[in-house]
Image (spheres, helix red, strand yellow):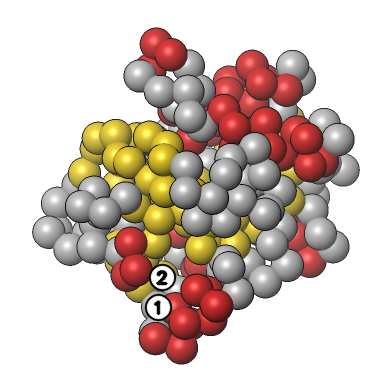
Amino acid sequence: MKIAVIVFPASNCDRDAATALEQITGTAPTMVWHGDAEIPDVDLIVLPGGFSYGDYLRCGAMAAQSHVMRDVKAKADKGIAVLGICNGFQILTEAHMLPGALIRNADLKFVCRPVDLVVEESQSMFTRKYKSGDRVRFPVAHGEGNYFADEETLTRLEGEGRIAFRYAKGDNPNGAAHDIAGILNEKRNVLGLMPHPERACDPMLGSTTGRALFQSLVESLA
């Protein structure tokens, strides 16, 4: 399985993602600089968390215009899997690869803690090792994780089974509409996820429930 992790200026979770992926797949991902024109032939592209470009303008707005994103979009259009975590989710919405937007948390405070999620959609390459209704525990670390979309978009996401993860009842840390923590694109090969599964892959970090997400990709892309 060949993987690329995109490195943006001020990203701080690219190494976390690379470490988790190497532990689970046995192969070190290729680290691709945001200014590169092309990504090597890979099976999976990861847009990591962090604060790309210092979150100037809007979170992910400048990163969405990075040179490398042209190839990310082109490869996603061809069916290559793309996983955007936290800031990566924000970049995917700013690049119009996923609908909606991530706006300021409802309480206007940065939140950094583990949260409980419910797996809503297990029939995807990202979630096939889970069962619908499974509860998992991933950390969050964001100030702009409040998923927003118009009612038509939310109805479409619900009806098409494109909400992959939802915050468990009573544990929504940011006010996201419909408790949305992660969504899929129409082709179901792009996932944007606000919590950090790569930080839930080692028992020393308090949870290993994120491993199944990466194991799902290994199985799907083998």
Q: Assess whether mark 2 and mark 1 are in contact (beta carbons under 8 angstroms).
A: yes
Q: Neighbour class for label 1 at 10 Å: few (<14), some, many (≥20)?
A: some
Q: Position of residue 48 (x, y in %)?
A: 53, 41
Q: Position of residue 75 (x, y in %)?
A: 80, 58
Residue ID at (20%, 52%): 170
Q: Nearer the viewer, residue 199 or 45?
A: 199
Q: Which mark is residue 103?
A: none
Please indicate, yes or no, whether residue 114 appears anywhere in the rendered image.
yes
Q: Amino acid at mark 1?
A: Ala
Q: How far apart are the alpha carbons under marks 1 and 2? A: 7 Å
* Placement of 201 over or under 165, stated as above or below: above
Q: Count numbered badges in the picture.
A: 2
Q: Quadrant of the C terminus?
A: top right
Q: Position of residue 211 (x, y in %)?
A: 57, 28
Residue ID at (23%, 63%): 175
The residue that mark 1 highlights is 149
